[in-house]
Image (tube, rainbow, N blue to C red):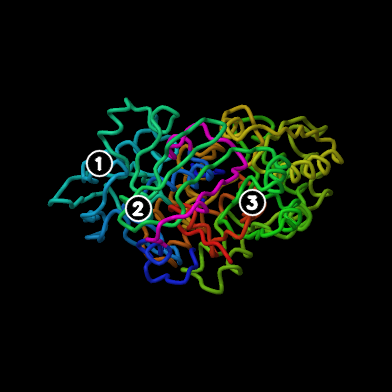
């Protein structure tokens, strides 16, 4: 589950396999000005992304670890630890490891290490955030020296992407795992990967530190040391920026963007982050098992006002779960029109009151809506919804919680109303919807027709046919109002003291992105 916690534009995009690091890397002797401090708007309790798969974990775990492949500037698959790869047939994939692929301790990356890493990602206890995606592997074997062949039990249109850190593969060493007795990702076990940055210290809920190594196949980047401080409070982060204590900050609150931009030498980048925000209903928790109650809640949310006032225009009303960008490959310029044709529920308090009057709780009800402290805009939107519902006799208690506590409420069988905040790391149109409506979904929604359409899309390779199937599933599910799309989002990242990354998409942050930082004169 990639929530939270899901295209790079640089000068030499032709060298996509190395994320253009050969163009950005420096072989000169580093000076004292090659360390950065990053502010994260939340805390991490584990560095291994499979164990704690929020989007912030992706951003941090990817500094140290790689997959077999990566994504280039357009989201296309390119080599990483695998120097070459090919899809042999509908269910067979072959990867050849590059000979210079080594771990940060100098040990070579072997096919056995990759198989072990995939097996670890398949384990629902070790990797609850990944196992959902990797259940379709039938076999893995070394078919030649340095060559891995993976056979699936059925075709999967998303599998090739899953072998990247944007997907679900973070390669580690079997020997390192066994030596640390499975404590990988903790303050004791840390991480061992293959990027130019090795984890040197991790204090949960405090910070994580990285240092540069010279073992990486892609070259030696300029940045030597990276420290990431966990600073959940937005005002504390702003103060740290104003006093020169940080160089980069993720998820700058939109309401504070002008204050950040006013800091000398600071650039605030607004980026379409492939995120989806929606209301999540648990269809087995009263009174949200009643579609009329769900209708009342949906009609009480003024999505346009939220985008304009809460998001300050940095986002757009979500007409569905799949984003327009995810459907461009299928529909081109028609993507927006195809989404607009789906069922919509506009803000209408009279319609909300009418739906409530015909529900099982015509006199109103009380429910709790939690949101993570890392998403203050979700809290502001929740308060707006609460105020609107109060006008028709419904009480919504809005509560800010830690991101860990918020994640625990999703599908817990107790919260009938919640948020879904999902960052699509792959940009695939089926990624988010398959999680929200597929098997074991957090809404406990069951519709055999929807499941059938998504299953067909799962194996379909033609992008137009696949998109048609996905939107067909979306239309049926929206008729049932299993969830309610709110907005497709953007994120704001602050670069201070002249640092910057030239980027137009979030794919850069699921790779060793500190190596791409440049500094203006």
Tell me whether the residue at label 2 lies in contact with that at label 3, contact meaning CB atoms closer than 8 angstroms: no
In screen coordinates, is 267 left or right of 216? Answer: right
Task: Look at the numbered disc 2 and give the secondary structure of its residue.
Answer: helix
In depth, the one of 102 and 160 nearer the eye is: 102
For the point 21% across and 41% down, the residue is: 112
Report which quarter residue 78 is drawn in.
bottom left
Task: Look at the numbered disc 1 and give the secondary structure of its residue.
Answer: helix
For the point 56% across and 52% down, the residue is: 476
**Which contiguous range is marked in magenta?**
25-52
Task: Look at the numbered disc 3 and give the secondary structure of its residue.
Answer: strand
Q: Residues within 10 Å of mark 1 (few under 14, many from 20)?
A: some
Q: Nearer the viewer, mark 2 or mark 3?
A: 2
Q: Position of residue 226 (x, y in %)?
A: 49, 46
In depth, the one of 98 and 307 nearer the eye is: 98
Q: Nearer the viewer, mark 3 or mark 1?
A: 1
Report which quarter residue 188 is drawn in.
top left
Residue lying at the far bottom in this picture: please name it.
333
**300 lies above or below 190:** below
How far is the residue under mark 2 from the one under mark 3? 26 Å
Instruction: From the image, tell me which residue sits under label 2.
Output: 159
Instruction: From the image, tell me which residue sits under label 1.
Output: 113
What is the chief secondary structure element of the magenta stretch?
A: loop
| Quarter containing the C terminus | bottom right
In depth, the one of 99 and 464 nearer the eye is: 99
User: Which disc number belongs to residue 485?
Assistant: 3
In depth, the one of 477 and 428 nearer the eye is: 428
What number of labels is visible? 3
Q: Position of residue 65 (x, y in %)?
A: 38, 46
């Amino acid at each position: 589950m990639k929530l939270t916690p899901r295209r790079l534009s640089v000068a030499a995009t032709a060298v996509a396999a190395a994320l253009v690091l050969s163009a950005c890397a420096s072989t000169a002797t580093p000076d004292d000005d090659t360390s950065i401090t990053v502010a994260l708007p939340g805390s991490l309790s584990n560095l291994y992304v499979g164990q704690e798969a929020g989007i912030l974990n992706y951003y941090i775990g990817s500094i140290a670890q790689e997959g077999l492949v990566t994504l280039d500037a357009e989201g296309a698959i390119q080599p990483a630890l695998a120097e070459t790869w090919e899809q042999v047939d509908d269910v067979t994939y072959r990867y050849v490891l590059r000979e210079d692929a080594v771990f940060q301790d100098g040990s070579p990356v072997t096919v056995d290490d990759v198989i072990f890493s995939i097996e670890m990602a398949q384990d629902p206890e070790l990797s609850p955030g990944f196992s959902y995606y990797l259940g379709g592997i039938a076999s893995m074997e070394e078919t030649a020296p340095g060559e891995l062949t993976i056979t699936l039990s059925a075709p999967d249109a998303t599998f090739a992407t899953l072998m990247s850190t944007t997907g679900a593969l973070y390669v580690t060493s079997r020997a390192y795992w066994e030596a640390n007795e499975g404590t990988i990702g903790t303050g004791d076990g840390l991480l061992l990967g293959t990027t130019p940055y090795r984890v040197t210290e991790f204090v949960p809920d405090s910070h994580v530190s990285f240092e540069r190594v010279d073992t990486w196949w892609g070259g030696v980047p300029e940045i030597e040391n990276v420290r990431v401080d966990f600073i959940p409070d937005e005002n504390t982060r702003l103060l740290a920026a104003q006093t020169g204590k940080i160089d980069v900050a993720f998820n700058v609150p939109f309401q504070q963007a002008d204050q950040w931009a006013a800091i000398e030498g600071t650039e605030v980048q607004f980026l379409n982050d492939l995120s989806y925000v929606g209301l999540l209903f648990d269809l087995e928790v009263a009174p949200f098992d009643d579609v009329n109650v769900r209708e009342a809640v949906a009609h009480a949310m003024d999505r346009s006002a939220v985008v304009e006032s809460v998001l300050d225009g940095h986002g757009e009303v979500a007409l569905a779960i799949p984003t327009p960008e995810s459907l461009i490959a299928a529909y081109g310029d028609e993507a927006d029109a195809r989404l607009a044709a789906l069922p919509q529920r506009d803000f209408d308090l009279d319609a909300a009151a009418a739906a409530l009057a015909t529900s099982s709780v015509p006199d109103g009800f009380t429910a709790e809506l939690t949101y993570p402290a890392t998403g203050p805009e979700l809290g502001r939107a929740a308060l707006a919804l609460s105020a609107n519902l109060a006008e028709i006799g419904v009480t919504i208690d809005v509560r800010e919680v830690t991101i860990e506590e918020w994640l625990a409420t999703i599908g817990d069988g107790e919260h009938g109303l919640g948020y879904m905040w999902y960052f699509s790391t792959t940009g695939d149109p089926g990624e988010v919807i398959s999680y929200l409506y597929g098997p074991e979904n957090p809404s406990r929604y069951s519709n055999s027709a929807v499941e059938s359409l998504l299953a067909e899309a799962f194996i379909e390779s033609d992008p137009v046919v696949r998109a048609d199937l996905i939107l067909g599933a979306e239309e049926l599910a929206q008729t049932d109002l299993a969830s309610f799309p709110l907005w497709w989002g953007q994120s704001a990242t602050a670069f201070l003291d002249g640092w910057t990354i030239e980027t137009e998409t979030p794919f850069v942050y699921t790779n060793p992105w500190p190596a791409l930082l440049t500094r203006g004169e």
